[in-house]
Image (cartoon, rainbow, N blue to C red):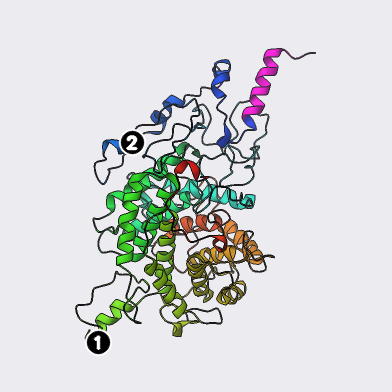
Amino acid sequence: MAEAPTLRFLRHARNVWQNSPWVVIAVTTHVIAGATLSIVSWRADAREDDLGPIAIAPARALEPAEALPEPKPLVERTPPPRDSERELVTPEEAVIPYVPTEVDLTVEIGDPALAPDDGDFSPSVSTNIGPGGPGHRGNGPSTRSHGHGIGHEKGGRTPIAPPQATQEAVLYGMRWLVRHQQADGSWSIAKLRDVCADSSCLVGDATYTEHYDEGLTALALLAFLGAGYHHASPEWIVDPRKGRQHRLGDVVKAGLRALEARQKEDGSFSATRPFLYNEALCTMAMCEAYWLSGARPWRASAERAVRFLVEAQKLSPRGGGAWGWRYAPREPLTTTQDEADPAALAAAFESDLSVTTWAIMALKSARLAGLDVPDESLEGALEYVRWVSLADGRAGYLTPDGAGLAVGGVNDHFTYHTAVMSALSMCSRTFVAHDADDPFLEAGARWLVRDLPLVGKDRLSIDYYYWYYGSLALNQFDGPDSPRKGAKYWGPWNDAMAETLVALQHREKEDCAHGAWLAPDRWSYAGGPLYATALDVLTLEVYYRYDNAFGVREERTKRAPSGERGR
């Protein structure tokens, strides 16, 4: 029997709806909205009422030109602004793929276990995060209005799609981060209990302070910025654990506002005294937010942060120029070096490779965003990195004498991976010098592949920090976009890293902890699962976060107009 035209139309509409990834719901929805209104209520105009406002106290009153209008229902695509710096607004060219409230948001939308012909017209939301192929029910690539990470230029290649399992892990990690964002937009390990739906996220009887909240907020923001999401991104992320949906742009904007509110006049962010891990991470987050969006308020904050970071840099014992960074900023010497007290000299000079590498990465993000970074600051930092490193590919934490030795700390019962210092030195050299022929790089890579990511029976080999910097260093050195071919080092590292991180992620769907990394490592005593989850999401974004640095010219030109950057 021939099927009625109305039934054929409805069946066709359902199939299109189910097979479209959530990030590519077409502008043409308004054309068929009248015909399907009785089945699905689009209700884009009601989305703010459904989600509730995000109350963020701004650090300062905005000028009229910087006002933040409420998002409006969008039905047409208009050309993006071609100003060199966008105002901080929701872009009117975006089409927001809103999930109707009739859909049960507690169901894992897009779950392949759901039959495609369940008889409803629920949208099939793709799990695709980052560039590459579709999620597990979507058809086609992501169509995000932004790019795929910081540093990518117009006309550059489309990065190779990461494995589906790692894309899902990134999605689940982002959901967990969204679910545990504080009301003021920040992230706090000390207040995690306040936003946790059950006790599944709280590991053991660990107690935490708020001393690292600024750095943890920045680290969580970098997890979203690393995938290319900024304050105006229109995509929604559905959280089945709490049955809510969140606009990713609002999540990022709230976090940035929280940092901006905490920033002091001198450019630092830490609540009490400046702590350089916090400062470097916050600087990086603000610089990447400005790069991705072109919004002037982020630029003002980023410039102050960069200025503080440069002024906090330690002095070189080789003549007083720029050197590395340590936990506290440089204290000015009141006398000459020859006359200074030995303790004062030590405080002026002492640097460590860990803080220094975070600071270098922050300043490189600043340069990519077109902000002014003194040449001598990066050159002095590179001089320190080279001084602390040995020709055999090892590096010391404070001095070259410490190469190959363990760095002590709270969790000394965990395995110490000495190759972490090799990874730090490799990253610093890669992003400052851009020299693929630097012999230290291959020597360091050899140390890394001798100690691949692995979870032993006692779980004492877990080290998210080492795995993050090792992944970044080797992806740059001989990953898919490196001038070196063959992936001799990146190949085995990537396989071990992806398998290990995916296996460690909490996947109990009924738990609030779903998507988190709960297993502690050597360094998580200060940030717990918040530190681990944000850092591991960043690690799994290594496939698309940065272009290969060995083909990059020095970024000393003005920032390209936002409409011409291929973002």
Question: Residue 280 placed where, x, y %?
Answer: 37, 62
Task: Give how far apart the Cα atoms at labels 1 and 2 are.
Answer: 54 Å
Taking the spot 47% from the left edge, 45% from the top edge, the residue there is 229
**Mark 2 burial class by Cα count in 10 Å: few <14, some 14-19, many 20+:** few
- 257 or 505, which is in the foreground? 257
User: Which mark's residue is nearer the viewer, 1 or 2?
Assistant: 1
Please say whether residue 181 is visible from this viewpoint.
Answer: yes
The image shows residue 159, relative to residue 522, as above or below, that is above
460 w.r.t. 9: above or below: below
Q: Which residue is mark 1?
A: 338
Q: Are marks 1 and 2 in contact (CB under 8 Å)?
A: no
x, y percent for residue 197: 42, 45
Earlier-in-chain disc, 1 versus 2: 2
Q: Is residue 536 left or right of residue 84?
A: right
Give the magenta-colored segment's residue range: 1-17
Please, what is the three-letter code of the amino acid marked with disc 2?
Leu
| Res 204 seen here | no
Residue 125 shown left or right of residue 379 in the figure: right
**Is 416 within the magenta?**
no
Residue ID at (25%, 87%)? 338
Q: Residue 68 bears which disc, if any?
A: 2
Tell me if residue 297 comes above or below residue 442 in the rendering.
Answer: above
Residue furthest front in the image: 557
Residue 116 found in image quarter? top right
